Image (cartoon, helix red, strand yellow):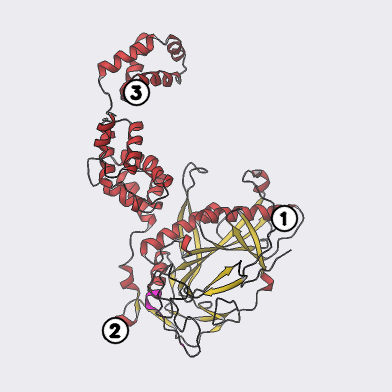
Amino acid sequence: MSVLPCRLCGCLPRYRLRSYSSSTNQSRKSKWKSVIGLEIHAQILSKSKLFSGSSTKYGAPVNTQVSFFDAALPGTLPVLNRRCVEAGVLTAMALNSKINKISKFDRKHYFYADLPSGYQITQQRQPLAVGGELAYVNFNPSVHKQPIKKKAKLVQIQLEQDSGKSLHDLEEKQSLIDLNRAGTGLMEIVTEPDFTSGEEAASFVKELQLILQSIGTCDGKMSEGSLRVDANISIHQEGESLGTRTEVKNINSIRGIAKAIEFEIKRQISEKESGRQIVNETRTFDAESGETLPMRDKEKILDYRFMPEPNLPPVHVYDSVGPGVSVEHVVIINQLKEQLQELPEEKRRRVQKQYGLPLNTAVILVNEPGLLSFFEEVLQDSKRDPVAVVTILVNEFLGQIHSREITVTNSPVSAVSFGELCDMLSSEKISLSTAKKVLALMFEKPESRPQDIVSEKNWLQVSDTKLIEETCRNVLTNSPKLVTEYKKGKKKVLNALIGQIQKDFQGRANPRLVIETLQRLIDSEM
């Protein structure tokens, strides 16, 4: 049964679908093939809207950024924002799409309370760009040991205007409309159905997000709605035609994309194996429950009655222009090429080659906002080993960032202080366990230098070889059973011996010297 919500108030019956565990039998799932395509709506990073001069600033008081045109007052006309066209062209170049030298706008008619004109201006039949391909890396460390390189093809990139927003007051039982977002410029990026899992789709969107942020055409802030994803999902068995698809609308997080798609695949498998048919419908994703819920039947969507937009001329894009043409009033591809920054895939290749790092590390450095810049700032001191720096950066620094729910760019620990900590670790003035404790204190007291913290806490590493050897001999003498087990081949008992030695030194003994000394002393008695 499909359920139609009220578009004005968003009311939806709250019955629950059965939850499907991620531990679903893999052999059961493997006989089904899933096919996924994406429609991504990226809000163009522009100070004003697509067809009016109203501001696009996020978080402004309701209905304070609305022009007469945004409110669809009679007699108002659209004026195309040149910046939005340039952003679309830049994005098309970054995604290897073919830019149409002439594109046109259409009216897409539908009647929602937050669409005052009764139609959306979009590009349906002759979009800004067509085709294209995006290489991305599917890498989830909890699932894959190594990154998997993938590619997905694009159908088209089109410009269109956003709708407003309905605000629902459940206590007063009324809905109000905020038109601040109405008319904001969007790029709709449509993919081919080239994905087979939620992870692949999420990895693709993450790559796209990084590209848009790199070239400055969208800020990619999914929590603010500037990047929203619709996923079209179907399943079929090997050798069969494609199944009936469902669309999951407005997914607003990378993790949510993976979860929504995986749930929907499992739901469709369960429906088919129970003898029921998949309904061609639009669904929504509930992030709290991790489930998709029905919104409306596809069959009940009204005919959009597409028609050419009569108030906007065709958009012309030029490779270059000859003398006498004012470049202020046209969009020139060759000029925009100069604005293309280093793209994520190029960064990963450079990081691997320049610093000798594996692909999985390069993926982490590039995917975490601000981390690569921080890493390279630390490495401005050419004496530092990139591998040693990235090890503590990824394993410890990033852990502190995530646990405190902050970003690298607003980290209280500077690259200079972090570099000094790396120097103390590489020179064996402190151990790795001590470095972890020092780093945690650096986040709590950013004004403190690592040297001062180590000195105050008396955490300098003990590297006196004579003292370490003497302690090792005492521990071996007092632990004959452990020594015997080690000689029989039980190498893991070495950890117990090391633990006893570190206890005597209060954890400050140089672990490299301890291991070397222990092995030398034991081997000399064998």
Residue that mark 3 sits on: 506
The secondary structure type at the circle numbered 1 is: helix
Q: Looking at this view, is 399 or 67 the one in front?
A: 67
The amino acid beneath tag 2 is Ser
Instruction: Characterize the local packing of mark 3: few (<14), some (14-19) or many (20 or more) Cα atoms within 10 angstroms.
Output: few
Image quarter where the N terminus lies is bottom right
Q: Magenta-highlighted stretch: main secondary structure?
A: loop
Residue 430 lies, in percent from the top left, at: 29, 31
Q: Looking at this view, is 444 or 210 the one in front?
A: 444
Q: Are marks 1 and 3 in contact (CB under 8 Å)?
A: no
Is residue 247 in the magenta section?
Answer: no
Residue 517 lies, in percent from the top left, at: 32, 18
Is residue 83 in the magenta section?
Answer: yes
The part of the image, by quadrant, that contains residue 509 is top left
Asked whether residue 197 is in view, the answer is no
Instruction: Characterize the local packing of mark 1: few (<14), some (14-19) or many (20 or more) Cα atoms within 10 angstroms.
Output: some
In this picture, residue 433 sits left or right of residue 488: left
Using the numbered discs, state the Cα–Cα distance from disc 1 to disc 3 in whole angstroms.
60 Å
The amino acid beneath tag 1 is Glu
| Residue for point 30% across, 15% down | 469
The part of the image, by quadrant, that contains residue 338 is bottom left
Q: Please, which residue is most extreme toward the front here? A: 172
Q: Which mark is residue 490?
A: none
Which mark sits nearer the N-terminus, 1 or 2? Answer: 1
Q: Which mark is residue 326?
A: 2
Residue that mark 1 sits on: 271
Tell me the mark number nearer the camera, choosing from 1 and 3. 3
The secondary structure type at the circle numbered 2 is: loop
The amino acid beneath tag 3 is Gln
Instruction: Characterize the local packing of mark 2: few (<14), some (14-19) or many (20 or more) Cα atoms within 10 angstroms.
Output: few
User: Magenta region: which residues?
Assistant: 76-84
| Residue for point 35% across, 73% down | 333
